[in-house]
Image (spheres, helix red, strand yellow):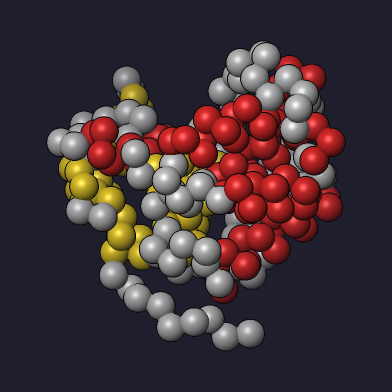
């Protein structure tokens, strides 16, 4: 199947990015342009993939350079920037009493382009439908990841960030996720969205618009 005609115009732009932890330099003068569509940040563990996603999310500040999304600077106009971003660290703890559906309701109020239909579809596709009313602490690590993935795909956020999305998933859920990402690339529900995935390999033959090797 051929891809639709796509623009190479950068929606997300990284210029001269520098970032280091004490005693450990991660990025120096990193430049990258991401067009709308699927993009991959690829490298093994410990190479800085999660740190880069946090920088792209506006979750932490670079020590040099800048990141802009639709022309909005992540530091100079942080609130407007972060309002366009979907990001949650999959390793972060969840509020124990929060249910998947209650979280989805919160996200629907936060993201103007949120799709309730896609939330329901992805929740069903990932096998979450029977668990939407359960507190997060009752869900397995894999099911908690599925909640995050279903919400990310339904968010409609201009920049959607997924860190190691297949971690802790069962095989049917991995297959569903890859199909959903393929559909996102071929017939995007929000044509201007940048969806950045961080993973150690290329996840099969997904049609990545941009691959950044760290």
Residue for point 39% across, 42% down:
85
Q: Position of residue 91 (x, y in %)?
A: 59, 26
Picture quarter containing residue 136? top right
Q: Position of residue 32 (x, y in %)?
A: 30, 57
Residue for point 79% across, 20% down:
138
Image vertical order of residue 167 relative to residue 214, above or below: above
Residue for point 67% across, 30% down:
100
Residue 46 is at least partly visible in this image: no
Residue 27 located left or right of residue 121:
left
Residue 64 located left or right of residue 167:
left
Residue for point 39% across, 52% down:
158
Image vertical order of residue 130 relative to residue 11, above or below: above
Q: Position of residue 81 (x, y in %)?
A: 28, 41
Residue 141 located left or right of residue 32:
right
Question: 166 or 194: nearer the eye?
Answer: 194
**Quick one: which residue is furthest to the left in this view?**
76
Q: Quadrant of the N terminus?
A: bottom right
Question: Number of numbered discs present?
Answer: 0
Image vertical order of residue 142 relative to residue 70, above or below: above
Q: Position of residue 209 (x, y in %)?
A: 45, 68
């Amino acid at each position: 199947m051929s891809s639709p005609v796509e623009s190479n115009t950068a929606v997300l732009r990284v210029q001269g990015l520098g970032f280091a932890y004490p005693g450990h330099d991660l990025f120096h003068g990193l430049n990258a342009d991401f067009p709308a569509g699927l993009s991959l940040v690829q490298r093994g563990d410990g190479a800085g993939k999660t740190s880069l996603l946090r920088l792209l999310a506006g979750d932490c500040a670079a020590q040099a350079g800048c990141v802009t999304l639709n022309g909005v600077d992540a530091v100079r106009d942080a609130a407007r920037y972060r309002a366009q971003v979907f990001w949650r660290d999959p390793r972060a703890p969840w509020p124990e009493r929060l249910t998947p559906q209650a979280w989805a309701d919160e996200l629907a109020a936060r993201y103007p382009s949120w799709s309730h239909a896609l939330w329901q579809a992805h929740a069903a596709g990932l096998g979450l439908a029977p668990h939407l009313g359960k507190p997060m602490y009752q869900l397995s690590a894999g099911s908690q990841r599925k909640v995050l993935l279903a919400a990310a795909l339904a968010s409609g956020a201009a920049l959607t960030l997924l860190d190691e999305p297949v971690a802790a998933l069962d095989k049917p859920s991995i297959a569903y996720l890859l199909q959903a990402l393929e559909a996102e690339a071929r017939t995007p529900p929000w044509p201007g969205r940048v969806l950045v995935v961080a993973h150690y390999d290329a996840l099969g033959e997904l049609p990545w618009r941009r691959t950044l090797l760290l």
